[in-house]
Image: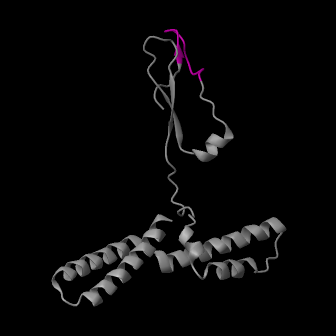
Amino acid sequence: MGRKYTWTNNHVYSKIDRAIVNGEWMTTMPTLQVRVMEPYFSDHSPLSIQFGRRTDNGGKPFRFLNCLADDGRFISLIKQCWCKEENLSSMGSIWAKLKEVKKALKTLNTQHYMGVDKKLKYLRDQLKEVQEKMDTNLRQHELIEEEKKLKNQIEKWDYIEES
């Protein structure tokens, strides 16, 4: 992008300068541009490589959350996915099983751990209400138990959110 020529002697204009990248750059940073800048005091134009973000709208990358490993269903899900018979080569079989594990863990995450931030906000609001009632209410024992219960739930969901 930019100027059409990278070198000139004021009579001849040529595109002799190049920016070189390797294959790893091309795969990890597929949207890059070489900008030919103004030469100012030189007869060569400097080149600037600009990196962009991927624009493909592929799915989100899989992120393993530690709270999934603590879930009671985790081991049985892994065993269920891993014990499936595949009629593929050994590496193809491993790849297919890993895809099944990913799918199962995404489902578990979506069904049981989605919206943790909203659950935490709701629990914190409930705790605040209980603590405000404790200042004015005579039934302290019930409120103390409710407060303990809410604090335990908040602690559990805080752990999940941090995982």
Q: Tell me if I can see residue 139 in this picture.
A: yes
Residue 61 in the figure: left or right of residue 162: right
Measuring from the top left, give residue 115's x and y in whole percent.
41, 73
Q: Is residue 79 magenta?
A: no
Residue at 67%, 74% in the rendered image:
100
Q: Determine the main secondary structure of the stretch shown in magenta.
A: loop
- The magenta-colored residue range is 7-17
Which quadrant would residue 18 be assigned to in this image?
Answer: top right
Measuring from the top left, give residue 57's x and y in whole percent.
51, 59
Number of residue marks: 0
Residue at 23%, 79% in the rendered image:
129
Q: Is residue 70 above or below residue 138?
A: above
Measuring from the top left, give residue 20's x and y in whole percent.
63, 30
Residue at 52%, 16% in the rendered image:
44
Q: Is residue 15 magenta?
A: yes
In the picture as drawn, the residue positioned furthest to the left comes out as: 136
The residue nearer to you, when weighing 81 against 76, is 76
Residue at 67%, 37% in the rendered image:
22
